[in-house]
Every structure is written in structure tokens, then in C-alpha cells.
Amino acid sequence: MGKTGLTILYIIGATIALLIVTFMGLNWYTNHGEFVVVPSIKGKSLFDAKKELNDYDLDFMIADSTYDDTKPPLSVLDQQPAKGAKVKADRKIYLTLNASSPPSVKIPFIIDNSRRQAELILNSWGLKVGNISYVPDMAKDAVLNIQVNGKIVKPGSIVPKGTMIELVLGDGFGNQVAEVPPVTDLTVLEARAVLEAVHLNIGMLFADGTIEDTLAAYVYDQDPKFGQAKNLGPGNTVNLFIRQLGGDKKE
């Protein structure tokens, strides 16, 4: 065999040897070429997730955290790579944890906004609308103050995300008062119309005898009486004493 042939053989041999050494090195570096199937650790506590990953010769890193009030604190919400992925031993699994407490947010300024506007703004800030109450004020459905657990709080106050914000709204009547109108000798239906015209409602109905048709029965007395009671605020009630139409009227 000539020099040229020997040279070619030498090159081929050297190349094969280099490939063998390289392969052996890679095989050693990657833990003999073995793969690990990533287990599912979503929903598990950080302690249990760490233990299970360690059993699989895997490491972990907390990549992110968020808050979900339906999941246990410090539980795993997400993992990357996902369950079933094949990775090399000692590979880091990146975890998203459920924070132990919700993030804090400022209560936005919603005073004088309508109920609908206030609800939209609060929801956009991650806050919830709680109890809604009304107080006398001419600004109907306008937010007059805000409360948390029954205590007035100021816009800009720091609260946990998801907090229930209670709204105190104007009823649209203010401190208006209505003089009690006379409704005796009217049917219940007519009396209701008269009372509603001044923002009052029928209270209790006290029947004298058998009543076949309540709305058609006539009113023979009322409480408070016309001219004897102090003025009532909107929404207050007047009790009616009724009798079947055609019966004798009481004086």
C-alpha cells in the first residue's frame, strides 16, 4: 500500500477515534444519555413538588407567581417543561406558584360616579362590588361613599386584590317629605295610585269581614290619618283598613 493509502487510512482512523471520544464524552456529560420523563406536579405543594422532582433527579426554579383564591397558597399552578416531557437529569423545571396572599391594589376614585360606572372601574382594578345601600340624597344612584366591612374608606386606600367594596348610593329623593294624603272612601287600587303619586306605599291591610277582591275593596280608615300625622319620607307606608264594597262605612 502506498503512502497515499496509508494517509487515507490514518485520517479515517483518527476521525473514528475522535467520534468515539466525543460520543463517550457526551454520554458521560448527559448521564449516559438517559432521559427523565417529567412528572406532573401541578396542584401540589412546593414541599411535595420539590421532593418529587428530587426523586426524579430533577431540579427546579420558581419562575413566576400569581394569586388564585381557589387554590392552596404556595401550590404549583404551572410547570415548564410540562408533564411527560423527556429531559436530561438535573434539568431545571420552572414553576409558577400560587402566592400566599393576594397582591395589594389602591381603591380607585369612584365618588360621584354612577353605580354602573363604579362597578366597571372596580372590576377593572381587580376589586369586587359588595353590599349596596341607599341614603337620602338627590343624586340618584351616585356613589356617595365607599366602605370595607362596614367602615368608610377613602379612595387611594390600599386593600388586597379581590376585596369587596361596599357602595353607598343616593336614593334620588334626598330629605324630601310627603304629606299623607286622604285615601278613605277610595278603593285599594285608587288609594295605591294616590299614595304612589307622593312616593308612599301601602303598608298593612286590615280587613273588616270577608274580602272577595282586595283591590276593589274600599278604604274606611287609614294610619297615619290625613292631617294628624307628621310628614313621611319617600318609601314610607300607610296602613289601610278595608271593607268589602257595599258594606256599611264606619265613621
Image (cartoon, helix red, strand yellow):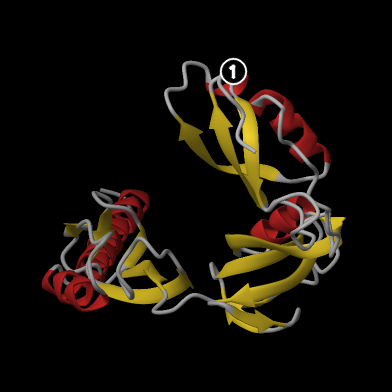
* Horizontal relation, residue 56 to residue 210: left or right: left
The quadrant holding residue 124 is bottom right
Residue 180 can be seen, yes or no: yes
Reading the image, the residue beneath label 1 is: 245
Displayed quadrant of residue 35:
bottom left
Drawn side of residue 165 relative to residue 208, left or right: right
Q: Position of residue 116 (x, y in %)?
A: 75, 50
The residue that appears at 65% across and 44% down in the rendered structure is: 222
Relative to 51, residue 6 above or below:
above
Give residue 154's position: percent from left, percent from top: 74, 82
Residue lying at 74% horizontally and 60% vertically, measured from the top left: 229
Q: Residue furthest left?
A: 55
Label 1 residue SS: loop
Quadrant including the C terminus = top right
Occupied quadrant, residue 134: bottom right
Residue 132: % across, % down: 62, 60
Depth order, front residue of 147/233: 233
Along the viewing direction, whichever of 103 and 147 lies nearer the viewer: 147
**Residue 75, above or below 4:** below
Tally of marks: 1
Residue appearing at x 86%, y 65% in the figure:
112
Judge whether 214 appears above or below 52 on screen. above
Tell me if 120 is positioned left or right of 220 in this view.
Answer: right
User: Could you classify mark 1 by the number of other residues whose Cα lies within 10 Å: few (under 14), some (14-19), or many (20 or more)?
Assistant: some
Amino acid type of the residue tagged 1 in the rendering: Leu
Residue 36 is situated, as x and y percent measured from the top left of the image, at 18, 59
Query: 36 or 218, which is in the foreground?
Result: 218
The residue at 44%/79% (across/down) is: 101
**Residue 66 located left or right of residue 37:** right
